[in-house]
Image: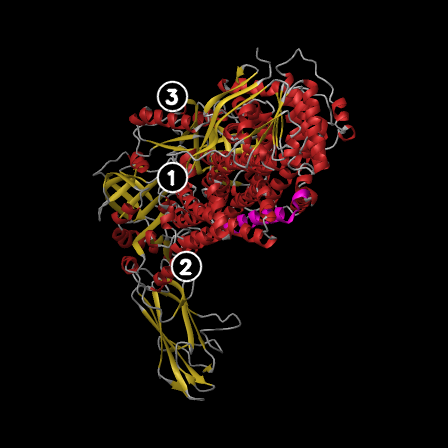
């Protein structure tokens, strides 16, 4: 029986149209991540790590292949269902914090709850304060992003990604812009919370030490150039 | 390398490039358009200024009746006279005329270096005695020698000797002699060339280059008012009242379209009668009429034609200086050929003038009326004025010294040239807000782009680009964008100005002026917009990236920090106060006849512009402050996502919103101001024209009409499209008013008090006693009531309540005396350009003089719009107009006739041009705002999408922010525009005859506001589609 947050990707291919012809960003990649486990995706630049993450997040659709989350094939969802999926099931962390500059720390975090609440009226919204305290941001709730350090901003980004208790956490180089100490703190925090809430965690990283925090590793190779793929 | 990067950047970001270049193009287009518009308008000012002129140039013959005497002066020796030597001065006076010259006086005075030899004066061979000194310059007054009467054909010889005190030449200045007579009291110098006959003079003048035609015109008054009066009669029937005899030929009649010979023609021996005279005498073609001239001689003429002369301005305009615009029509007129006038009429007047004891008050006028080749005059009135002055000198040089020249066209062009200068400055001022707007738009685009390029510049810095590199790139980018925009703007400006002016006006403009405008407009626009674009970009580069990001949400804009809005408010307050104290808003209206152009204090035009800037910035200050106050406090309560995001976005970035609103407000304010100004201008011009015409429609039965209308015939003109018609009896000096103290001829209007008020644009302020309504009620109630003009009442030394004796239809067979009492006074009444001096009830007038028909009818269409007016006139032409000849004047035709002043300038055209560009700029501003928003915040929007916000919510957010800017800017713009328009109308008041009522056309305001809102919706929708097409995976990954 499939767990509710198991990830299954089958023969995923992503082609991009470019001025010089079609460029293959992802070439027949398959993956299977058990619900509640974690996977670190590694590989050289240009091998399609972020593209794969985009497919898992429902931000993009594969040219070929399917993506299923918890038994639902999200690659066949329409835009509205994918938006609903992201809103309810997904938490994302990026290398850049991507916080809204005009919102304070607590507003950035609670905005995710506000977005989420529209379709989940039965769910009681949690107070963000305990979460911020736990992430060491308790005294910074009223600060704007530009008043925080890089590590603090990334912790806010983590808080925003998990505040609504998603079933799937995706992180794209979440520690890429941090020093070693902050990087370790952020990844440990992510794994700890992922395990606590039982979410499936997929992490893209170049850093093997960071990758070692995950249950499994997936090494991607750079896609081969397709024969006759040039559009001319 | 840098150039390639900049070029690639511009090509690969087409939306940024296009929005900025279009902004620059619109700004430069507007500025060039205004300059081209001024060129085109100036080019048509000459033709427009001279269009209403009936006679370009007049040579008025000053040789007076009975003045056909000549004086010849010679010396017995010639050449140089030695000191102590003597010579004889011989004077010979001849009367070459047909009548005796009376009281002929000869005056002769030796010049410097010569002395009169005592006792040497001789008259017809006899020594002049009784005078100790020079009898030709006797006493302190240097009186001349009176020869008494000199009979026609006789010669009188005079002489005296002079001795040289020092050696000198015996030239024309050696002795100064002249002669005068009772009939010709202006001294005529000796040796003056023989007077050229009028026909010969016309022929000579016609040959002068630049003269299209020169025709002779003579006329003289006949009638009971004139001493030595004459009359026109047919058998026993006499045309009663003042009459006129005119002498001109068919060529003269052909060149003046207001002379209509409706039957027959003008022949060398026959006479053309005015329609009124023919009707009064009951004669038609072929009948014989008798003209009794002032010397009682009688001339019998065959009626060869009948004419409508009632609108012939060249014949009946007053020739009195300072009164040239007065139209003094004489219904009973007879026209003869110039030959008949010279052979028969003129001698009769000479005889009357030379009869001892008689005095001719108004001698015949003889003149050459000259038309110039108007189409060869320079398009610019100042140059044309110089040209016509040169032609005038050439005309004067032909057979000089027997007349004087009235260069009407030169006076008109002088005024037009002065008006043209005022117009140029005025139009540049009206166009100035557009230019400023263009610079502001460029600065705004620069700010938005600089924000958007912050990340790119940071990347370039990281890669090693120095500040110098970035500035060079900025300069290059600015130069390319501005040059491209300026090039397009030049073309757009030319095309729009040409389309607005129409009719090939720009083709008439000189190439040099167009080239100057093109250079000024494009370079000025290039410099202004380029500088604005460059400076904003430079400021962005000079700021540290981190500081920029940190300050983004809180930074107060430069105008707010420097208090520019408060400075502008201070300028408005101080300027208005000073202008009110020195009465600078009053100005002075123009008048061609007084040779005065419109006086506009153009410094005052700074005030509306200051109101515009001050108002817009002040509103933005308040708006920004209000948004800052509504800024929500930090809260962890989630609330509803979209309203919360909206509140946080505008509350935390108030000045970005306020800056966008300022630009929208400036544009909407300019549109509102222009719409309000146009509406007020149009309304005032229509009111002026309606006032001059007496009503929207004026129906005058043609003199050639076979019908006789009565007061109750007003109903004949009432059609479906005409609401009301009222009859009016009116004439120049048609009554004599006699008070207890004095009497005077006056212009009386007899009106129907029941209907006049519903047709004529009466205003209470024009009545010194009571109101318009009470005056009409009084006239209706009391048939013996009369209202007097304040001026006439003061002259008669009469006041309300006094009795007045009124001689109605004076100088006619029906004239009758009535006793009326003065019920009140008025200042001015509509419909009587010459000025009605008394008003009474038409019922009472008709009761006393039943035969007197209304002179015209005034009518009002159902509604006041142009379509209703056209419909009403059409009905009149198709209805009553087919049964009889009617002259229909409307407020529109009256307005078209008044094309000689600055007031007739195509201000509406300029306003259209300004409005078109303003609206286009409004659209571009909104587009720049929305796309700037997207450039600056695309990462925010994509993050929100990744967080699960639907695309439509992102679209709603963008629309809400842009909508806030658009709505706030529009509301502020309307308020500021209304104030700005009021100032414009106040400053330009001298353009109007009547004080204009400031009106704000609500319907016209809807267009710019709707356009701004639609543009907001369109840009936001297009923008949100772009956002939703962005690849979040790539965008969110980038640092």
Residue B261: image quadrant is top left
Label 1 to label 2, Cα distance in Å?
44 Å
Residue assigned mark 1: B241
Please rate how many residues cluster around mark 3, counting C-alpha atoms within 10 Å: few if below 14, some from 14 to 19, many from 20: some
Task: Say whether marks 2 and 3 touch (CB < 8 Å).
Answer: no
Q: Secondary structure at mark 1?
A: loop
Q: Residue furthest right?
A: A139
Please rate how many residues cluster around mark 1, counting C-alpha atoms within 10 Å: few if below 14, some from 14 to 19, many from 20: many
Q: Earlier in the sequence, mark 1 or mark 2?
A: 1
Residue B575 or residue B580, whichever sits in front: B575
Chain of the residue on which disc 3 is drawn = B
- Closer mark to the observer between disc 1 and disc 3: 3
x%, y% of residue B729? Answer: 43, 31
Up-down: is B110 above or below B647? Answer: below
Q: Earlier in the sequence, mark 2 or mark 3?
A: 2
Magenta range is B524-547
Q: Earlier in the sequence, mark 1 or mark 3?
A: 1
| Residue drawn where x is 46% and y is 78% of the image | B111
Label 1 to label 3, Cα distance in Å?
36 Å
Residue B712 or residue B649, whichever sits in front: B649
Q: Secondary structure at mark 3?
A: loop
Q: Secondary structure at mark 2?
A: helix
| Residue drawn where x is 37% and y is 56% of the image | B60
Q: In this rendering, does residue B565 appear at all?
A: no
């Amino acid at each position: 029986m499939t767990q509710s947050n198991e990830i299954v990707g089958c023969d995923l291919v992503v082609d991009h149209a470019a001025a010089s012809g079609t460029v293959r960003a992802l070439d027949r990649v398959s993956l299977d991540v058990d619900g509640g486990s974690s996977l670190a995706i590694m590989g050289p630049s240009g091998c399609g790590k972020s593209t794969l993450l985009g497919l898992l997040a429902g931000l993009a659709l594969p040219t070929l292949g399917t993506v299923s989350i918890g038994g639902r094939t999200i690659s066949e969802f329409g835009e509205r269902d994918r938006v609903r999926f992201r809103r309810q099931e997904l938490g994302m962390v990026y290398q850049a914090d991507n916080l809204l500059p005009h919102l304070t720390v607590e507003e950035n975090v609670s905005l995710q709850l506000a977005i989420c609440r529209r379709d989940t009226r039965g769910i009681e919204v949690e107070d963000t304060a305990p979460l911020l305290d736990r992430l060491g941001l308790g005294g910074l709730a009223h600060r704007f992003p530009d008043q925080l350090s890089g590590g603090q901003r990334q912790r806010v980004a983590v808080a925003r990604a998990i505040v609504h208790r998603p079933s799937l956490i995706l992180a794209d180089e979440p520690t890429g812009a941090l020093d070693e100490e902050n990087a370790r703190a952020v990844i440990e925090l992510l794994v700890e919370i992922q395990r606590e809430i039982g979410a499936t965690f997929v992490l893209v990283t170049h850093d093997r030490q960071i990758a070692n925090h995950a249950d499994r590793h997936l090494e991607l190779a750079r896609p081969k150039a397709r024969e006759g793929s040039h559009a001319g | 390398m840098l150039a390639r990067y900049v070029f690639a950047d511009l090509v690969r970001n087409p939306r940024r490039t296009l929005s900025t270049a279009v902004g620059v193009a619109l700004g430069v287009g507007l500025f060039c358009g205004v300059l081209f518009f001024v060129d085109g308008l100036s080019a048509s000012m000459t033709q427009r200024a001279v269009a209403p002129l009936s006679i370009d140039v007049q040579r008025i013959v000053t040789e007076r009746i009975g003045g056909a005497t000549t004086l010849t002066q010679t010396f017995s020796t010639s050449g140089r006279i030695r000191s102590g030597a003597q010579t004889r001065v011989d004077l010979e006076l001849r009367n070459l005329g047909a009548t005796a010259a009376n009281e002929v006086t000869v005056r002769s005075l030796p010049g410097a270096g010569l002395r009169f030899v005592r006792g040497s004066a001789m008259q017809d061979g006899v020594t002049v005695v009784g005078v100790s000194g020079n009898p030709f310059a006797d006493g302190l007054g240097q009186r001349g020698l009176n020869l008494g009467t000199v009979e026609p054909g006789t010669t009188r010889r005079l002489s005296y000797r002079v001795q040289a005190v020092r050696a000198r030449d015996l030239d024309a200045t050696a002795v100064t002699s002249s002669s005068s007579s009772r009939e010709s009291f202006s001294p005529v110098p000796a040796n003056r060339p023989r007077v050229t006959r009028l026909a010969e003079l016309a022929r000579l003048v016609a040959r002068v280059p630049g003269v299209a035609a020169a025709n002779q015109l003579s006329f003289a008054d006949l009638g009971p008012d004139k001493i030595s009066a004459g009359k026109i009669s047919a058998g026993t029937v006499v045309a009663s009242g003042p009459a006129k005899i005119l002498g001109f030929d068919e060529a003269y009649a052909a060149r003046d379209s207001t002379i209509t010979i409706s039957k027959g023609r003008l022949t060398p021996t026959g006479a053309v009668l005015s329609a009124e005279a023919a009707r009064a005498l009951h004669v038609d073609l072929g009948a014989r009429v008798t003209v009794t001239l002032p010397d009682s001689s009688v001339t019998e003429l065959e009626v060869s034609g009948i004419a409508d002369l009632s609108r012939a301005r060249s014949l009946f305009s007053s020739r009195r200086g300072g009164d040239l615009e007065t139209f003094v029509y004489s219904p009973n007129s007879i026209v003869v050929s110039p030959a008949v006038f010279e052979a028969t009429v003129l001698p009769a007047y000479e005889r009357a003038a030379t009869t001892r004891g008689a005095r001719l008050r108004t001698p015949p006028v003889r003149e050459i009326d000259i038309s110039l080749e108007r189409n060869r005059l320079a398009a610019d009135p100042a140059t044309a004025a110089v040209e016509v002055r040169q032609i005038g000198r050439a005309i004067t040089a032909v057979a000089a010294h027997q007349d004087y020249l009235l260069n009407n066209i030169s006076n008109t062009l002088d005024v037009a040239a002065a008006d043209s200068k005022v117009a140029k400055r005025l139009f540049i001022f009206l166009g100035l807000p557009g230019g400023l707007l263009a610079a502001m738009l460029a600065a705004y685009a620069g700010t938005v782009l600089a924000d958007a390029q912050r990340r790119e510049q940071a990347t370039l810095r990281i890669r090693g680009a120095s500040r110098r590199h970035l500035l060079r790139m900025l300069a290059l980018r600015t130069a390319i964008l501005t040059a491209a925009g300026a090039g397009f703007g030049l073309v757009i400006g030319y095309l729009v100005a040409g389309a607005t002016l129409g009719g090939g006006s720009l083709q008439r403009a000189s190439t040099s002026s167009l080239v100057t405008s093109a250079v000024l407009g494009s370079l000025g626009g290039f410099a202004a917009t380029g500088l604005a674009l460059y400076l904003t970009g430079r400021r962005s580069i000079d700021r540290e990236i981190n500081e920029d990001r940190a300050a983004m949400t809180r930074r107060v804009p430069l105008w707010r920090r420097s208090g520019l809005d408060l400075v502008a408010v201070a300028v408005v307050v101080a300027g208005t106060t000073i202008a009110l104290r020195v009465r600078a808003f009053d100005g002075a209206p123009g008048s061609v006849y007084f040779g005065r152009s419109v006086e506009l204090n153009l410094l005052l035009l700074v005030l509306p512009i200051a109101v515009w800037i001050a108002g817009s910035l002040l509103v933005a200050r308040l708006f920004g402050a209000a948004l800052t106050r509504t800024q929500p406090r930090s809260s962890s309560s989630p609330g509803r996502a979209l309203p919360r995001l909206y509140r946080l976005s505008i509350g935390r970035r108030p000045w970005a919103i306020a800056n966008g609103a300022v630009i929208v407000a400036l544009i909407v304010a300019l549109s509102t101001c222009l719409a309000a100004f146009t509406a007020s201008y149009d309304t005032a011009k229509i009111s002026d024209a309606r006032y001059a015409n007496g009503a929207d429609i004026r129906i005058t039965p043609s003199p050639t009409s076979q019908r006789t209308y009565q007061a109750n015939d007003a109903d004949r003109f009432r059609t479906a499209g005409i609401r009301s018609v009222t009859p009016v009896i009116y004439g120049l000096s048609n009554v004599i008013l006699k008070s207890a103290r004095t009497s005077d001829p006056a212009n009386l209007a007899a009106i129907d008090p029941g209907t006049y008020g519903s047709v004529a644009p009466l205003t209470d302020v024009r009545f010194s006693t009571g109101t318009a309504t009470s005056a009409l009620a009084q006239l209706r109630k009391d048939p013996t009531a009369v209202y007097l003009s304040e001026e006439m009442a003061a002259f008669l030394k009469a006041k309300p309540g006094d009795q007045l004796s009124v001689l109605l239809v004076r100088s006619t067979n029906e004239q009758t005396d009535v006793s009326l009492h003065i019920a009140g006074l008025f200042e001015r009444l509509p419909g009587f350009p010459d000025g009605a001096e008394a008003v009474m009830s038409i019922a009472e007038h008709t009761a006393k003089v039943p035969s007197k028909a209304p002179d015209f009818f005034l009518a009002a269409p159902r509604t006041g719009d142009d379509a209703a007016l056209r419909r009403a006139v059409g009905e009149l032409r198709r209805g009553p107009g087919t049964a009889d000849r009617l002259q229909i004047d409307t407020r529109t035709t009256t307005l078209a006739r008044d094309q000689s002043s600055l007031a007739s300038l195509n201000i509406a055209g300029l306003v259209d041009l300004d409005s078109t560009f303003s609206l286009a700029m409004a659209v571009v501003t909104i587009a720049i705002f929305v796309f700037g928003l997207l450039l600056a915040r695309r990462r925010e929007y994509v993050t929100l999408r990744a967080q699960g916000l639907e695309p439509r919510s992102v679209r709603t957010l963008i629309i809400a922010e842009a909508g806030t800017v658009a709505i706030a800017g529009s509301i502020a713009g309307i308020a500021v525009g209304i104030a700005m328009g009021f100032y414009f109308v106040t400053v330009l008041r001298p353009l109007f005859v009547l004080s204009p009522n400031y009106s704000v056309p609500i319907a016209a305001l809807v267009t710019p506001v709707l356009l701004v809102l639609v543009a907001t919706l369109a840009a936001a929708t297009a923008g949100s589609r772009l956002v939703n097409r962005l690849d979040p995976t790539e965008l969110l990954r980038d640092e």
